[in-house]
Image (cartoon, helix red, strand yellow):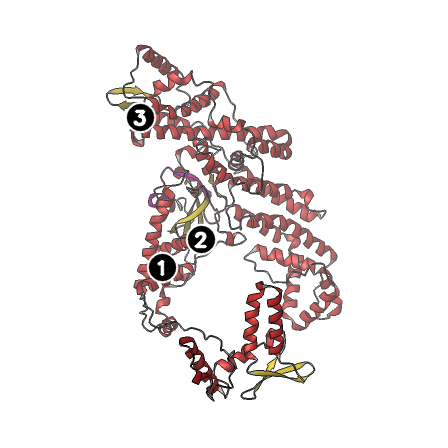
């Protein structure tokens, strides 16, 4: 005789109650299962098969104990949805339950003939609640959400006129009026303008400048599309970026192709004089058009760091170019083709695929085999993964040649060695590219570590014994070194802005990499740090003048100011990034005096607060001023900050240049922010250290240096989005987008980026 499942469940429930009160949820669940068995009983059909039979209509159903495949849900549906022939009686039970919950039961109801056989514990599961159809319709909100959906998922604006979409919305809510194309277009533009104003306010509060990247897309119409993005440290000292403009470029190959997009960006976002660096991908534009962008940099950044703050190459595109060089090497073409054809044959031939799987089981591995996939040759990472998976299946492919006569592709052991060596070479580039695809953008100091690691691993001695692969690694290293010489100063100065390393890491890595030339390379970094700091100090001094009543235009119109700026711009601070070694300037005594004077002037910025309106210059002070002016005239051949700007406070004229000279002797022994920072002990290294958070906390101690750090640590070296790092081709605008007006296209793409990065 079969045991009733309800009896077993009840026993378990009692045991759980006796053991612990914490099993209350389990007890309730089992009670619900016991309710089902008030309507069903089980019977054994065979030793391995049981069925549940309804006690009311005698229908049988599949049932398997402790197996979700045949649980009790289908039995509950038989009861709840009126399938059972005795459903009328069940409805009476439901009615009794409703009456007992609304009012106390009467004795006549309990003892009536219709209910005397009904167990009081028989309660039906609650039915699913259906939302009320009287929910008010918010037409404006629906249109707003539809506009957001179109922007976020790149749906065409005309989808609101597609019959299938309109029919779906009408079936979903007949009262809803589907927006027209013009309405949804206006909603998208309105969302763009609203988000743009929020982004403007967001950028206005940043502590430093903005670094621009320009990525140029192609189209079938031979028209380019410039994506101008801003990278910066926000007011909370988080590294962030925003797409600022998308502009149509009529002639991508012209010498001034990018001037108009960058000009529009600076005007739209009020960034004149606030651009710290510009990075451009040289895929579709020529070198002259990139050089013509130098004038858009802030004045202090046009010539410092050997002019490397204008970068004409994208790091991600460099990695893709190196990977393509490896994959298209002539001596490796035949092995790669054999591997690709072998995988195609296994994937497309059912008989061969079955035989291949059988052979895989004969050669087990500690870890599961990688999936064999045919590569997409527009993404080089898929080619790398294809070759890597093929190497894991090398033994299986070798056996397939003898076990499957129709497979006639023979890969020799020497060719397998070449493939394995190529994979080791591609792995180095792949790991470098993978670092650019993370959810968080790398700060410049972190990117320095990634690049020096790549430079070390590309050494031919690390590429195995195969001469072809060693020669390939040598050519890749030369290509990387050429890129490195054009940007190493920016990276190295950013490392100095990391309080865990400062100049110590630069000296260590350069000594290991450059041997006897390490001192020259290290000195070029030290000079670059000091020169850049002095330029930021001058800007802070100019800001101090503005704070005391002068406008930047008034200061800039002073003859000496204009003359000194021109002289500074022509002192030869720039150097071509194509040189084989860093430029080491001869530091003369006059140059050192100039640097010291600039640093001393920066320290005076905070002293102006103590100058009162009643302060008067004595004859002795004036004599000091005359002496200082004579001293300044003697050094007029050296670029320095203007000394003839007058600051009027009430009826008293104070000569700022003279006041600075008064303090020169007093401040000759004072240390600059940079000196203090470099002399302090290193911060202990830890995994959770955040360099931007450190500068946020210490921005009060280093007001000038913190602005410099904010700009340098946010310099981007990749112009493409993380999902395009492994692309081998330039992005192309699709036909639908090219049919849209330029303003509409910009609104859709920029708003998508802002929504993706979080509503501001």
Would residue 458 be visible to someone looking at this image?
no
Secondary structure at numbered mark 1: loop
Q: Is residue 570 above or below residue 713?
A: above
Separation (CA) of disc 2 from disc 3: 44 Å
Q: Badge 3 local density, few (<14 within 10 Å), some, or many (20+)?
A: some
Q: Which residue is mark 3?
A: 558
Q: Give the image quarter of residue 270.
A: top left
Instruction: Report the side of 90 relative to 428 (left or right).
Output: left
Q: Earlier in the sequence, mark 2 or mark 3?
A: 2
Give the Cα separation between the discs numbered 1 and 3. 48 Å
Q: Secondary structure at mark 2?
A: strand
Q: Is residue 409 left or right of residue 33?
A: right
| Residue of label 1 | 740
Measure how far apart labels 1 and 2 are at the Cα level: 16 Å
Task: Please state the extent of the stretch shown in magenta in the rendering.
Answer: 265-287
Are discs 2 and 3 less than 8 Å apart at CB? Answer: no
Quarter assignment of residue 506: top right
Residue 744: percent from left, percent from top = 34, 57
**Residue 759 visible from this viewpoint:** yes
User: Going by the picture, which residue comes out furthest to the front?
Assistant: 107
Number of marks in the rendered image: 3
């Amino acid at each position: 005789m079969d045991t009733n499942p309800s009896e077993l469940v009840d026993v378990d429930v009692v045991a759980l109650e006796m053991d612990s009160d914490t099993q209350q949820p389990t007890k309730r669940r089992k009670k619900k299962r016991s309710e089902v068995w008030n309507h069903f009983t089980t019977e054994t059909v065979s030793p391995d098969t049981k069925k549940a039979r309804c006690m009311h209509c005698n229908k049988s159903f599949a049932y398997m104990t402790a197996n979700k495949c045949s649980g009790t849900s289908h039995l509950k549906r038989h009861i709840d949805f009126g399938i059972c022939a005795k459903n009328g009686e069940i409805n009476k039970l439901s009615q009794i339950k409703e009456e007992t919950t609304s009012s106390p039961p009467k004795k006549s109801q309990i003892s009536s003939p219709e209910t005397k056989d009904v167990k009081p514990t028989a309660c039906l599961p609650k039915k699913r609640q259906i939302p009320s159809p009287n929910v008010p319709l918010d037409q404006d909100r629906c249109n707003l959400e539809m506009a957001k959906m179109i922007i976020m998922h790149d749906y065409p604006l005309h989808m609101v006129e597609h019959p299938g979409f309109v029919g779906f919305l009408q079936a979903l809510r007949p009262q809803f009026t589907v927006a027209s194309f013009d309405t949804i277009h206006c909603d998208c533009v309105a969302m763009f303008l609203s988000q743009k104003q929020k982004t403007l306010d967001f950028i206005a509060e940043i502590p430093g400048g903005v670094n621009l990247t320009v990525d140029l897309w192609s189209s079938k119409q031979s028209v380019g599309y410039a994506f101008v993005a801003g990278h910066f440290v926000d007011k909370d000292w988080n590294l962030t970026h925003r797409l600022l403009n998308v502009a149509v470029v009529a002639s991508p190959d012209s010498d001034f192709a990018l001037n108009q997009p960058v000009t529009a960006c600076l005007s739209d976002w009020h960034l004149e004089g606030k651009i710290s660096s510009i990075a451009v991908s040289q895929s579709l534009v020529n070198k002259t058009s990139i050089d013509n962008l130098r004038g858009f940099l802030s004045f202090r950044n046009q010539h410092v760091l050997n002019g490397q703050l204008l970068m004409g190459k994208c790091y991600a595109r460099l990695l893709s170019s190196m990977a393509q060089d490896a994959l298209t090497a002539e001596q490796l073409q035949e092995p790669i083709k054999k591997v690709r054809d072998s995988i195609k044959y296994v994937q497309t031939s059912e008989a061969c695929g079955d035989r291949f799987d059988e052979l895989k089981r004969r050669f087990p591995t500690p870890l599961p085999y990688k999936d064999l996939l045919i590569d997409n040759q527009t993404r080089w990472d898929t080619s790398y993964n294809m070759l890597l998976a093929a190497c894991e299946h090398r033994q299986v492919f070798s056996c397939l040649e003898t076990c499957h006569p129709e497979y006639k592709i023979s890969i020799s052991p020497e060719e397998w060695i070449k493939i394995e060596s190529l994979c080791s070479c591609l792995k180095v580039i792949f790991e470098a590219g993978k670092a650019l695809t993370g959810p968080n953008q790398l700060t410049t100091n972190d990117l320095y570590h990634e690049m020096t690691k790549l430079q070390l691993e590309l050494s031919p001695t690390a590429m195995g014994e195969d001469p072809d692969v060693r020669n390939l690694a040598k050519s890749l290293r030369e290509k990387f070194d050429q890129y490195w010489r054009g940007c190493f100063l920016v990276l190295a100065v950013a490392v100095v802005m990391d309080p865990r390393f400062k100049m110590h890491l630069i000296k260590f890595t350069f000594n290991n990499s450059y041997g006897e030339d390490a001192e020259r390379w290290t000195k070029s970094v030290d000079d670059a740090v000091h020169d850049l700091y002095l330029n930021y100090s001058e800007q802070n001094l100019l800001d101090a003048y503005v704070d005391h009543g002068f406008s930047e235009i008034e200061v800039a119109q002073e003859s000496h100011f204009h003359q000194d700026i021109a002289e500074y711009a022509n002192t030869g601070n720039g150097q071509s990034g194509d040189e084989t070694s860093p430029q080491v300037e001869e530091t003369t005594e006059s140059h050192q005096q100039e640097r010291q004077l600039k640093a001393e002037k920066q320290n005076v910025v905070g002293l102006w607060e103590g100058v009162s309106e009643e302060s008067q210059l004595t004859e002795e002070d004036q004599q000091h001023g005359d002496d200082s002016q004579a001293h300044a005239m003697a050094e007029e051949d050296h670029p320095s900050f203007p000394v003839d700007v007058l600051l009027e406070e009430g009826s008293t004229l104070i000569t700022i240049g003279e006041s600075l000279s008064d303090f020169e002797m007093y401040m000759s022994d004072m240390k600059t922010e940079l000196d203090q920072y470099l002399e302090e002990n290193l911060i202990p290294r830890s995994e959770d250290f955040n360099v931007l958070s450190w500068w946020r906390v210490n921005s009060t101690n280093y007001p000038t240096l913190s602005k410099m750090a904010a700009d340098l640590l946010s310099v981007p070296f990749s112009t493409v989005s993380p999902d395009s790092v492994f692309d081998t081709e330039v992005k192309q605008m699709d036909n639908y987008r090219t049919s849209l007006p330029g303003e509409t296209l910009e609104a859709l793409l920029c708003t998508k980026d802002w929504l993706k990065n979080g509503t501001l």
